[in-house]
Image (tube, coloured by chain):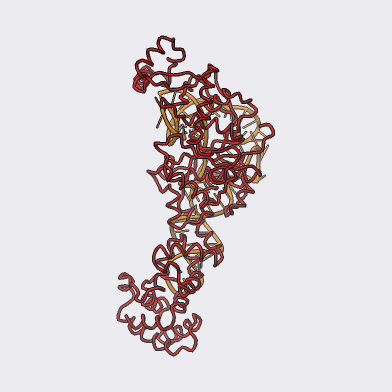
Chain colours: A red, B orange
RNA sequence: GGCCCCGUCGUCUAGCGGCCUAGGACUCUGGCUUCUCAAGCCAGCUACGAGGGUUCGAAUCCCUUCGGGGCUACCA
């Protein structure tokens, strides 16, 4: 590891929206870099341009920013080792590939995909480990000429020597892979484009990455990466340190994927999860601070995070716990913060205008405190507050059937009587007047009496606190609604 | 199939040989509070996959077994 500064990279291949697993990795990468005072590098692995699109790349950048995982080197911010899109580094990979050829570390392979497939089938049938058989390791000049004449375009393959590769994984300890199960792998496609196997290793070396924290699925590809380091002439002491993170799994016990749960971070954002809640929850998936603390801010996370405390076993994603944490984070917001987060949701739902009017802003700011402790996602705000911004409430049929009967007519009439002449229109006065008139004098059960009024005023038997709601709604509109039922 | 990784309450985890009749959080159940819904508070249910060792003593170390997962591409 010599004495280079710590540099941790997050290098996704955006073949879609970033998902939960990606973000967990990004979070750990970021937290470790911040914890150690090192550098957080963000690189886009787009060597497979048939699957990675510009839109996905832009979305990935946006998502990381939204989460607050700011990077020191990478797209938009630049750095001394750019560019940070692999598709813009093609000459670099080509140069190294040809050097590997010259050194004899790699060789041209003329086998066609069909031939390889056929031989793999044979290997499987005869009980051998499937993998490249080394046919093209040595090709005679006349054969090479013949292949070329046949129009075969070769790939470049790395030669795996006899023996094994051993490396230390910070999370899993010593890992050894026998090269019998690490076949010669392709570095460059027939069309000349590089593969992940080449680009990832070259970039990690060139960009002076010291720590590679990534998904467990890459564990068995590590020997190949180390093989490239060797070919590049990197001293073993300068290899990056590996830490293979356990999976985040879906409820169906398979690696969390598009098929078995909500994986796209975009979805969580639309639902109204706060970035800090997502980060807090994800941090707890595979890591813990060691004490009983669970509610952590992003900066606390970066203070406490160490790789040593990362678990080796996979974690199941639990929406309920995420929601619980999100609710906690929402409750911890200041009114102003809560307002800033709420506004886009209210506007998108057309509950308020865009831009919001001063009158609406006033109402929203008065109403937010009474709903803050009763929502778990920002997306719940618009339906909860809609009754304040409409002239005519939508009465929920179920609520009407349950609470607006013959008895309720009497309750509401009485309410109108005492509310109309009320000297001051605030929730304490409303509360007092109604309680006296309905509970004390009419002898009604509070639950029953107030439910009738609640339905008439808010449209539903489930609502924010009634008297505060009436106060915010205003006397005129409250009385109108009572009179309307 | 082969290679590799993993195995504590339903879920996330604490635990790194005695402090564990296994702690916390979420979920769930019951109760309190109460104008609904929440929030809050209190209580409760529930776990060391199994079998062998090592040891005075094992959730913690070793082996086997079972179970889950990953990789096995001219994807990453």
Residue A68 image point, x, y percent: 55, 52
Say above or below: A250 vs A366.
Answer: above
User: Is residue A307 something one can see in this rendering?
Assistant: yes
Position above or below: A244 against A165: below
- Residue A160 in sight from this viewpoint: no
Q: Which residue occupies 41% across, 49% down?
A: A262
Q: Is residue A417 left or right of residue B24?
A: left
For the C terminus of chain A, the quadrant is bottom left
Could you tell me residue B29's position as x and y percent?
A: 44, 59
Quadrant where the N terminus of chain A lies? top right
Q: List x then y, in percent, for residue B18.
A: 65, 41
The answer to which quarter of the image holds residue A450 is: bottom left
Q: Quadrant of residue A72?
A: top right
Q: Is residue A164 above or below residue A401?
A: above
State the residue in front, A207 or B61. A207
**Direction from residue A112 to residue A246 in the image, left or right:** right
Between A32 and A419, the residue placed more toward the observer is: A32
Residue A317 location, x and y as percent? 46, 47
As drawn, B61 above or below A384: above
Q: Quadrant of residue A478?
A: bottom left
């Amino acid at each position: 590891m010599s004495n280079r500064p710590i540099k941790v990279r997050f290098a996704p291949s955006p073949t879609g929206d970033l998902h939960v697993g990606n973000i967990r990795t990004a979070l750990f990468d970021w937290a470790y870099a911040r914890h150690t005072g090192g550098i957080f590098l963000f690189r886009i692995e787009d060597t497979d341009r048939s699957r990675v699109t510009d839109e996905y790349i832009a979305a990935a950048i946006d998502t990381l920013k939204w989460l607050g995982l700011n990077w020191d080197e990478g797209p938009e911010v630049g750095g001394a080792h750019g560019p940070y899109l692999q598709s813009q580094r093609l000459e670099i990979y080509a140069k190294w590939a040809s050097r590997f050829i010259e050194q004899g570390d790699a060789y041209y392979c003329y086998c066609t995909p069909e031939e390889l497939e056929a031989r793999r089938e044979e290997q499987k049938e005869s009980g051998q480990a499937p993998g490249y058989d080394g046919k093209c390791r040595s090709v005679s000049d006349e054969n090479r000429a013949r292949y070329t004449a046949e129009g075969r375009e070769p790939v470049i393959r790395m030669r795996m020597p006899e023996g094994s590769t051993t490396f230390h994984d910070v999370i899993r300890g010593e890992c050894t892979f026998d090269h019998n199960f690490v076949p010669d792998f392709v570095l460059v496609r027939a069309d000349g484009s590089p593969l992940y196997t080449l680009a990832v290793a070259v970039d990690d070396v060139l960009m002076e990455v010291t720590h590679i924290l990534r998904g467990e699925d890459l564990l068995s590809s590590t020997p190949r990466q180390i093989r490239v380091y060797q070919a590049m002439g990197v001293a073993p002491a300068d290899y990056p340190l590996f830490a293979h993170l356990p999976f985040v799994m879906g409820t169906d016990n398979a690696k969390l994927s598009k098929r078995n749960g909500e994986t796209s971070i975009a979805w969580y954002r639309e639902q109204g999860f706060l970035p800090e809640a997502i980060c807090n929850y994800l941090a707890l998936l595979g890591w813990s601070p060691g004490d009983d603390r669970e509610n952590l801010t992003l900066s606390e996370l970066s203070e406490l995070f160490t790789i040593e405390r990362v678990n080796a076993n996979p974690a199941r994603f639990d929406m309920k716990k995420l929601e619980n944490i999100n609710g906690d984070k929402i409750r911890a917001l200041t009114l102003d913060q809560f307002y800033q987060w709420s506004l886009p949701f209210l506007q998108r739902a057309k509950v308020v205008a865009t831009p919001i009017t001063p009158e609406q802003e006033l109402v929203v700011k008065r109403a937010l405190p009474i709903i803050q402790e009763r929502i778990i996602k920002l997306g719940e705000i618009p339906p909860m507050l809609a009754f304040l911004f409409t002239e005519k409430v939508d009465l929920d049929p179920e609520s009407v059937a349950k609470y607006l009967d013959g008895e309720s007519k009497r309750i509401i009439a009485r309410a109108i009587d005492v509310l109309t002449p009320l000297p001051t229109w605030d929730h304490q006065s409303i509360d007092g007047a109604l309680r006296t008139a309905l509970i004390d004098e009419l002898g009604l059960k509070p639950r029953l009496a107030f439910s009738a009024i609640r339905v008439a005023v808010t449209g539903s038997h489930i609502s924010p606190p009634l008297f505060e709601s009436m106060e915010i709604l205003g006397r005129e509109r409250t009385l109108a609604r009572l009179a309307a039922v």
